[in-house]
Image (cartoon, rainbow, N blue to C red):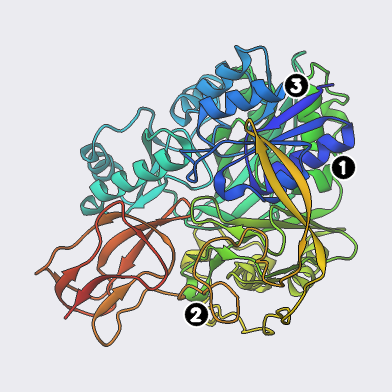
């Protein structure tokens, strides 16, 4: 077994890996940006090292800083989690060339499957049909237009080196092609460090079904079962479940066999997921994610296997302790992602800020994988996943009811969350009868009844009185040569300590973080303001332009997602107050329309 694992990631996946390592007696090393000094994964790890910087590019995508932390800590293995460098061949190769174990597939397999274009070629060679599309990188928007004109609109532009909906844009007409390709490339570069994109047909009403596989170094490859991930917004998953409902067993077995063929075709080792689109009884290879998926817990609950444990065992050279015939699936599991987003009106606006309270649900068959606790701050610079709530039931209906009960118990304050949308999905007859698709949330699910998030004022902050203060213990963080140490100090209790992680940002008189507005608005004065903290990546208008209702004024990046700031009234642009690269906060005026 490995001795010390460095987790090159953050948030709930870093916490998830740390916990299994601790159960196996494996030491853990966390890395962190300046904004994550007091993050939960840092607090739980045995050691922690500063990467510097705030953005992902400055920290979790800083190869040199991560390699330095590996060397200083003496870690003999690296777990990449998901996102960031998890599908980066160069990073995996840099790790293995130093004699350090990469907990994932070999670099050669990532090179094939981490690049969605080459993975299409590998699947074709293995006899597995993919979604019709172009199996080469796009060089211009003209190629998008030509494909759409030949095969019909809409089409999908997708990041070649990513997943999770980042860098994916659906293009409905030729006039949208250039802006969509530019936006997809920006998102892909920001989240995955590479901006290559490719093109596929966009199926009208498919279900997204993926197959979990695991392979060892001894030639054993098995599929563990499928997950239905069809409830999505912005091409990112909200609800996942296993087994897939209303899914014929002969198709399940055929899909499992196809997934094994794809894994063998690229010499795959460790845990991976082969994704398919399923429509009208047929399935098409979509991509292979050469890493652990966000939704892996639902597979764990129905199989009884700890996938992180098997990742570590396979990376250590162990053979799988089971065959395909040994894999048994029991009951039904559902996972919902609790993201810091306001789903009011179906907008799903990112909601960075400080979590003032987080009350987890309990009871039988309930699991919460969280990356935050009350007092932690969710930054605009990273993914906005707060936690994954997972339940198990004897059958799908029991699991559905249990999830609704657990969602009712869960209480998160300080930021908006997707919980109201999750409840709407789980309560809908279309979901209960499995009549949904990847387009269902955005096309058919009515979220107009969801009001914008408003945090109550809460109790007034307590402060110490005048005079002498009793001394209290204060745990602080010190860094020596880049290594993080926890130090206890006994200081006067002045009663003005802020919550953990809440060292920056606008605060209200009650001491709570200021709440972002729920939606972009055009006020009576004609000002156009932004609803959240973020960075302006593109300005779409100039002074003197005539704009219509719904026209995009600028594009704002927050939490690795691009958001259009749109006009809600027609008129003439009299002022533009921002430029690309500017940082803005909730309520900042970006333009004036008269």
Indicate the quadrant where residue 462 lies. Answer: bottom right
- Residue 116 in the figure: left or right of residue 591: right
Kindly indicate whether the residue at mark 2 contacts the one at mark 1 (C-beta within 8 angstroms).
no
Quarter of the image with the N terminus is top right
Indicate the quadrant where residue 479 lies. Answer: top right
Kindly indicate whether the residue at mark 1 contacts the one at mark 3 (C-beta within 8 angstroms).
no
Give the residue pinned by disc 2: 448
For discs 2 and 3, the disc positioned in front in the rendered view: 3
Residue furthest to the left = 544
Q: Earlier in the sequence, mark 1 or mark 2?
A: 1
| SS of the residue under disc 3 | helix
Sort mark 1 into few (<14), some (14-19) or many (20+) by Cα contacts within 10 Å.
Answer: some
| SS of the residue under disc 2 | loop
Q: Earlier in the sequence, mark 3 or mark 1?
A: 1
Give the residue pinned by disc 3: 315
Q: Nearer the viewer, residue 116 or 208?
A: 116
Give the residue pinned by disc 1: 304
Q: Is residue 385 above or below residue 452?
A: above
The reply to whether residue 302 is visible in this rendering is yes
Q: Is residue 176 above or below residue 277?
A: below
Residue furthest to the front = 467
- Measuring 25% from the left and 76% from the top, which residue is drawn there? 549
Q: Earlier in the sequence, mark 2 or mark 3?
A: 3
- Residue 534 in the figure: left or right of residue 11: left
Sort mark 2 into few (<14), some (14-19) or many (20+) by Cα contacts within 10 Å.
Answer: few
């Amino acid at each position: 077994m490995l001795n010390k694992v460095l987790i090159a990631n953050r948030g709930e996946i870093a916490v998830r890996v740390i916990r299994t390592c601790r159960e196996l007696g494996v030491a853990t090393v966390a890395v962190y940006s300046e904004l994550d000094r007091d993050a939960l994964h840092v607090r739980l790890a045995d050691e922690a090292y500063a990467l510097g910087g705030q953005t992902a590019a400055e920290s979790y995508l800083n190869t040199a800083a991560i390699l330095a932390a590996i060397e200083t800590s003496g870690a003999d293995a690296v777990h990449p989690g998901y996102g960031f460098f998890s599908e980066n061949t160069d990073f995996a190769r840099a790790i293995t060339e130093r004699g350090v174990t990469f907990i994932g597939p070999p670099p050669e397999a990532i090179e094939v499957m981490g690049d969605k274009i080459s993975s299409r070629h590998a699947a074709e060679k293995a006899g597995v049909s993919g979604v019709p599309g172009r199996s080469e990188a796009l060089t211009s928007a003209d190629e998008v237009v030509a494909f759409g004109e030949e095969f019909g609109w809409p089409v999908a532009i997708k990041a070649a080196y990513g997943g999770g909906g980042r860098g994916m844009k659906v293009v409905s007409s030729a006039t949208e092609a250039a802006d969509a390709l530019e936006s997809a490339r920006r998102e892909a570069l920001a989240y995955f460090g590479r901006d290559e994109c490719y093109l596929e047909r966009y199926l009208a009403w498919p279900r997204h079904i993926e197959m979990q596989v695991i392979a060892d170094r001894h030639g054993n490859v098995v599929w563990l079962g499928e997950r239905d991930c069809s409830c999505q917004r912005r091409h990112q998953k909200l609800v996942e479940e296993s087994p897939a409902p209303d899914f014929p067993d002969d198709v399940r077995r055929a899909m499992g066999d196809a997934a094994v063929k794809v894994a063998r075709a690229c010499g795959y080792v460790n845990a991976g997921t082969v994704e398919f689109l399923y429509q009208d009884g047929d399935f098409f290879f979509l991509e292979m994610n050469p890493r652990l998926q966000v939704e892996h817990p639902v597979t764990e609950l129905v199989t009884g296997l700890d996938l992180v444990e098997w990742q570590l065992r396979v990376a250590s050279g162990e053979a799988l302790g089971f065959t395909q015939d040994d894999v048994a699936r029991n009951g039904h599991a559902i996972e919902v992602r609790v993201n810091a987003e306001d789903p009011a009106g179906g907008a799903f606006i990112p909601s960075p800020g400080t979590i003032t309270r987080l009350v987890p649900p309990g009871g039988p068959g309930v699991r919460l994988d969280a990356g935050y606790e009350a007092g932690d701050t969710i930054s605009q610079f990273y993914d906005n996943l707060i936690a994954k709530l997972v339940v198990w039931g004897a059958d799908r209906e029991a699991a559905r009811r249990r999830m609704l009960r657990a969602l009712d118990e869960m209480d998160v304050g300080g930021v908006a969350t997707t919980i109201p949308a999750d409840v709407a999905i789980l309560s809908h007859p279309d979901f209960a009868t499995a009549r949904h698709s990847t387009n269902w949330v955005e096309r058919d699910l009515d979220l107009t009844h969801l009001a914008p998030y408003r945090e109550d004022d809460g109790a007034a902050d307590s402060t110490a009185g005048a005079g002498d203060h009793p001394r209290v213990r204060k745990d602080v963080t010190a860094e020596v040569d880049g290594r993080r140490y926890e130090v206890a100090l006994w200081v006067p209790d002045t009663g003005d300590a802020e919550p953990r992680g809440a060292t920056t940002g606008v605060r209200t008189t009650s001491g709570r973080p200021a709440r972002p507005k729920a939606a972009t608005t055009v006020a009576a004065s004609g000002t156009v303001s932004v609803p959240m903290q973020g960075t302006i990546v593109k300005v779409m208008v100039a002074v003197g332009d005539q704009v219509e209702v719904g026209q995009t004024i600028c594009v704002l990046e927050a939490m690795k997602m691009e958001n259009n700031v749109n006009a809600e009234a027609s008129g003439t642009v009299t002022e533009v107050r921002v430029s690309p690269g500017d940082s803005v906060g909730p309520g900042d005026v970006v333009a004036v329309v008269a």
